[in-house]
Image (cartoon, rainbow, N blue to C red):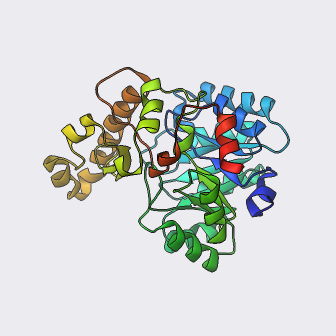
Amino acid sequence: MSTQLTDLLKIKHPIIMAPMFLVSNTAMVIEGMKSGIAGCIPALNYRTLDELRVSINELKAAKVSGGAFGYNLIVNKSNIKYKEQLRVICEEGCDFILTSLGNPEETIREAHAVGIKVFCDVTDLHFAKKVEQLGADAAVAVNSEAGGHRGNLSPQELTSLLHKELNIPVISAGGVGCKADINTMLSYGAAGVSVGSPFIASIEAGVTDDYKQACVDYGADDIVMTERISGTPCTVINTPYVQKIGTKSTGLEKLLNKNKTLKKWVKMIRFYIGMKTTEKAALQATYKTVWVAGPSIEHTKAILPTREIVENLTN
């Protein structure tokens, strides 16, 4: 299937394996590339710059024709590692960078200088127009069906709107769990799709079997929004532990967020605490289960190799 995304990245299928905090790893991306799709890993999955550099070189060595790889950068001030991560990625090279949660201007400038494409997460037309003006190679339309931090507009509304108003390709992110969903997104004008949650239950994913099995056992109706991870609404599986701790910010956090001076620091602390909680749930056997996922786990029926998940999405 040939689309603007397959042409941009020289891949067989118009699919990006979405970057997922703690879940995405080189093993998944390598299997994805072998299957003809692109894979993306959050730079924050690596504690050190040396680890990030090693992963880039591992993927460069494993890259095959018809596959591509990239990295996700959180480009706002809460990510103090951002500038150094960008430097390492530009030094070592990859096919694309996907930006989230901030102004991508510096990333676009630095990445383009070394021939790396930049795709930018957006949730509405206003920001989509901004990233287009800054020179983004594509807009990633994060819709209301996305896992993790999602948008407010439906897949049809957001994708159709951006396809109509932008001159750059639109990649639809959210609500894809099977081939029929991909075809639907393409019918809205998408040049491709970003797919995350179905790959959590892959054999190669570096999270606990409990997390993977939860994506099999739970479905779309079990996904809820919580403010308890990063301070920004995020979708998680509604486990008994999530029900116990609730999904809203505490009264103190709400009060402090009204203070312009303290707001930034409160968000940074909440982000740190939330990420640590998520890390424990994803990587350790614990009753404190905060598992990030989207409603597309409805189509996840078994823990499978990445290769088979791609086959299910494309056949």
Residue 131 lies, in percent from the top left, at 59, 66
Q: Residue at x 56, y 50 (%)?
A: 177
Where residue 168 sits, quadrant-wise, is: bottom right
Residue at the spot 49% in from the left edge and 70% down from the top edge: 124
Tell me which residue sits at (59%, 29%) in the image. 49
Q: Nearer the viewer, residue 177 or 38?
A: 177
Q: Residue at x 55, y 31 (%)?
A: 303
Residue 208 visible, this angle: no
User: Which residue is at the front of the view, 30 or 54?
Assistant: 30
x then y, percent, for residue 156: 53, 71
**Which image quadrant for residue 260?**
bottom left
Q: Position of residue 184 (x, y in %)?
A: 61, 65
Between 86 and 163, the one nearer to me in the picture? 163
Q: Name which quarter of the figure residue 182 lies in.
A: bottom right
Q: Residue 273: in sight, yes or no?
A: yes
Image: 206 above or below 141: above
Counting the numbered discs, the total is 0
Comparing 100 with 237, the one in front is 237
Query: Position of 204 compared to 255: left or right?
Result: right
Residue pushed farthest right? 65
Question: Does residue 307 lie above or below 3 as drawn?
Answer: above
The N terminus, quarter of image = bottom right
User: Where residue 226 appears, x then y in whole percent?
Assistant: 30, 48
Q: Compared to 224, does 2 lie above or below?
A: below
Taking 228 as reference, is 58 left or right?
A: right
Residue furthest bottom as drawn: 164
Q: Which residue is most to the top?
A: 285
